Structures are given as structure tokens and as C-alpha cells.
Amino acid sequence: MTDKNAAKTEFKADEKKGLGTIIGKISGKGKLEAEIDRLSLKVAELEFALQGAKNQLEKKEVLARQAVSDRQEAEARLNQELIRTQTLSHELESIRNESQEKLEFRGIENLSPAAAQAYLSKINSFCSSSEDLLTVYLPSGTRLSDVLPEKTLGFVEEETRSLLDRLDTETGIVFFYDLHRMVSEAIIPPFPVTSSAWHLRNNFETASLEENLNSPCRLLVLVLHAGESFIGFAPDARVFDQEEFVRSSVKEKHSKGGFSQRRFERLREEDIAHHMNKVFETLDKVLEENSPIDCIIMNGDTPLIREAEKRLPLNIEIIEKPADIKVERMGREEILRTVLSSRRYLL
């Protein structure tokens, strides 16, 4: 090959090589541009997704702020309602207490033993075609709600229950109640109701009350007043078999002030102490002669009763009777009739 031909061949090779380079460059740029486009699209997609996430976050933040606001508003309303409820409850309780204070018994009377027997006869005459006559026996310190089931308790009006709860007695209560309110009353018996019980029948249950009224216990009656006291023993709780009147000279109360009054009161207290020594001396004798004693009924001045309680045997039932018994004005039969009386409350 001549030099001219060799040069021409080399020129063509170089020409082909340069064209390939140019074409290669053009082809690489296209790929780069395509990659740039792809990345740009990806960036756009990510930016769109990011914006969507920001929008969702903003919405959630708005909802969260609204939720906090709603919760605070709800708590404020709840507090207002609680305050309102407490206020209404207080007002209701005040109204209820006021209304209960205005409640009064329809009647109150003392029943002598003979009158109590007549009462029993009358209450026994009630008879119903359905079981709607309620009898409840309540020992001292027991409430109606402690004995009756909730459903049965609901049959008794709240006013009646309130009046019944007012009765504070050492011997308990016997409650007679017609669910139609033809009968609604309580009996305070002379001797303690020993156990709680209730009956809803077509008649009133009076057997236990009758046993109470006819109790054959060996009874001692002790009436204590400064200057004049009474001790009586009834072996069958019907008639005194032994009576003792204890009288002493006790000064009347002094109304003037100063040293004179203090000296007078001291002398009066000495007189009372002397009188009580005479009472205890006689009481010890009666207790010894008539042992055993089942029950002692006490009446009179509270300080003297408390002093006597310290001297009495612990194994004897002691009942404090609130009746106003004046030894100087009442005979022995009337004293016994008074301490054995029952008290009737119309509710």
C-alpha cells in the first residue's frame, strides 16, 4: 500500500472513530437527561407525598388542638354539673330535713296494762283478703332498714320511716302497718323486744307483743327523787309484794347567789348523799330478800339514777322509764301501772 492509500485509510478510520465518539457522547447525554427526568419525577412525587404528609399532620394537629379544647370544655361543663349537683343535693337534704322536722305524730298516748290488752284485741281484729298487713319487731337501737328487705321497705312511706327512726327507746318497738295506710302505728312495750322479726300476712302478728305485756318476770321498781324515793318488788309484774318509801329532809334549791348559795348547795348535796345512803341500804335489803330479780325499772332524777346504776348487780336487766312519777302524789298501784304502761305512736 502506498503512502497515499495508507493516509486515506487512516483518515477514514479516524473519521469513523470521531463519529462514534460523537454518537457516544450524544447517547450518554440522553441517558443522563433521562435519569435527570426520572429523578425530577421522583423528587416531585416525594414533594407531593411530603406535602400530603404535612397536610395530614396539620389536620391532626388541628384535630388534636380541637380535642384538647373539647376536653377542657367538657371538663369545665362536668365541674359545673358537679357543683350544680352538689348544690341541688344540699338543697334537697335541707328541704328533706326541714320537712322531717315539720313531720309530727298523728297522736301519742300511754296505754295502761288494761288499755294495752284492749288495744291487742282491736289490732287482732284486723283481717285482709291479701297479705298486706305488716308487723315488725325492732329491738332497741334497730332501724326498720336493718330488718326489712329492700323491696318490702319500699312499701313503707319515707315520712313514716322518718317518724319511726325518731323513736329512741330502751325496750324497742312493735310496728303495725297496713300497706294501704289504714293502720300505721308503733307500740313501745314495757319490756325489751329481744329479737328482730317481720311478718307480711293477712293479719297482724301480736303473739310476741302479748307475751311481752304479760311477762311474769320478778320485777323491782326504783323511783329516785331527792328527799323521797320508792322501792317496790312485784314477783309476777302485776302486784307489789313489798314496797318501801324512803324519805329524808333535803333542802330545796337555793335561788340566791354568792357565798350563801354555794354553802347552801353544799349542804343540799350532803342531804341528798345522806338520802341516797338510806335508799341503798334499803335497796340492798330488798334485793337480798327477793333474789333473784329479773328486771329493774328505774325512774326519777337522772343524776340519782346514774349513781344507783353503779350500785346495782350487773346481771340484772335495767330499764330506765321516762314517765314522770311523783312518789308523794301517786299510790303504789298507780306507780306500778305507770311503769308497766306501753306508749302508742300514730305515724
Image (spheres, rainbow, N blue to C red):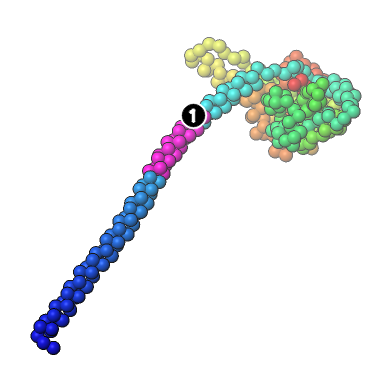
For the C terminus, the quadrant is top right
Q: Is residue 101 left or right of residue 109?
A: left
Above or below: residue 34 compared with residue 339: below
Q: Which residues are magenta?
A: 57-81
* Majority secondary structure of magenta residues: helix
Examine the image and state in which quarter residue 148 appears. Answer: top right
**244 to the left or right of 27:** right
Which one is nearer the viewer's eye here, 27 or 105?
Answer: 27
Residue, disc 1: 80
Q: Residue at x 28, y 65 (%)?
A: 31
Helix, strand, or loop for circle 1? Answer: helix
Looking at the rendered structure, the number of numbered marks drawn on it comes to 1
Does the magenta segment cover residue 73?
yes
Residue 260 x %, y %? 51, 14
Q: Give the x, y percent position of residue 106.
A: 74, 17
Quadrant containing the N terminus in the rendered view? bottom left
